[in-house]
């Protein structure tokens, strides 16, 4: 938490979404199954990823990032590539990346489309709460793996704000 507060020059309020801690407004879109995640849940997820992902020099893929996990991970030293379909979200990521000089790549793409990313050793997704949505996110991330070595999958399911959230590794 201290590193995040220092990097972003904020006092983190764990009960609100991370983007709100940065003084930004964002309207989550139901058509993309976006749900606000409180900062406490986001920090918990980042800690789990750091605990289990041993390859800091490798790129880490974040498939869909309405909770802003890639911003936290990149300020903690993980080289992230974030993908999302939402143009507004991509624009916000770009603005925050540039302002805080984060080592973050940002790509707009649809998980239902062709995967043009490769050689990742891990990815995180918080897919829509449907079987079809979860399959699409997982297939997209797995196709981006290094073909020889495979990798780590971090799948976040449930509703953190309701205490019903799990991260599967």
Image (spheres, rainbow, N blue to C red):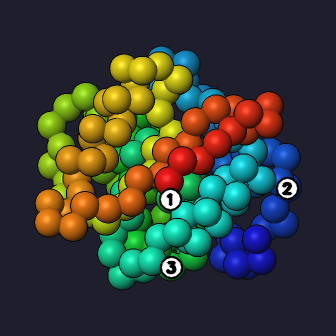
Can you give x and y, in whole percent of width and height, for residue 112 in the image? 25, 28
**Residue 9: x, y in percent?**
74, 73
CA distance separating discs 3 and 1: 11 Å
Q: Neighbour class for label 2 at 10 Å: few (<14), some, many (≥20)? A: few
Q: Which residue is mark 1?
A: 70
Numbered badge on residue 124? none
Per the image, label 1 sits on a secondary structure element best described as: helix
Above or below, 153 relative to 120 = above
In percent of the image, x 47 and y 33: which residue is there?
127
Residue tagged 3: 77
First reached walking from the N terminus: tag 1 or tag 2: 2
Q: Earlier in the sequence, mark 3 or mark 1?
A: 1
- Where 146 sits versus 162, above or below? below
Q: Is residue 163 visible in this depiction of the protein? A: yes
Pair 2/3: label in front: 3
Circle 2 — which element? loop
Gap between marks 2 and 3 measured at Cα: 22 Å
Return the x and y of residue 100 as percentages of the image width and height. Answer: 56, 72
Separation of marks 1 and 2 at Cα, in angstroms: 18 Å
- Callout 1 environment at 10 Å: few (<14), some (14 to 19), or many (20+)? many
The quarter of the displayed image where residue 148 is located: bottom left
In the rendered image, the vertical position of residue 56 relative to residue 129, given as above or below: below
The residue shown at (41%, 29%) is 134
Foreground residue among 56 and 26: 56
Label 1 near label 3: C-beta < 8 Å? Answer: no
Percent position of residue 81, x then y: 36, 60
Residue 125 in the figure: left or right of residue 13:
left
Q: Is residue 142 above or below residue 88?
A: below
* Residue beneath disc 2: 13
Compared across the picture, whether 6 is left or right of 134 comes to: right
Q: Give the quarter of the image for residue 45.
A: bottom right
């Amino acid at each position: 938490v201290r590193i995040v507060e220092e990097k972003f020059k904020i006092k983190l309020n764990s009960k609100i979404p991370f983007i709100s801690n940065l003084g930004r407004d964002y309207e989550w879109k139901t058509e993309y199954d976006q749900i606000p995640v409180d900062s406490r849940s986001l920090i918990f997820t980042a800690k789990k990823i750091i605990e289990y992902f041993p390859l800091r020099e490798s790129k880490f893929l974040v498939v869909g990032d309405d909770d802003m996990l890639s911003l936290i991970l990149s300020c903690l030293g993980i080289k992230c590539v974030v993908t999302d379909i939402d143009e507004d979200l991509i624009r916000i990521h770009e603005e925050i990346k540039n302002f805080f000089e984060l080592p973050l790549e940002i790509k707009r793409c649809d998980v239902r489309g062709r995967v043009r990313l490769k050689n990742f050793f891990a990815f995180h997704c918080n897919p829509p709460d449907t079987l079809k949505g979860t399959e699409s996110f997982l297939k997209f991330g797995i196709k981006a793996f290094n073909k020889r070595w495979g990798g780590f999958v971090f799948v976040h399911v449930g509703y953190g704000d309701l205490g019903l959230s799990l991260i599967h590794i």
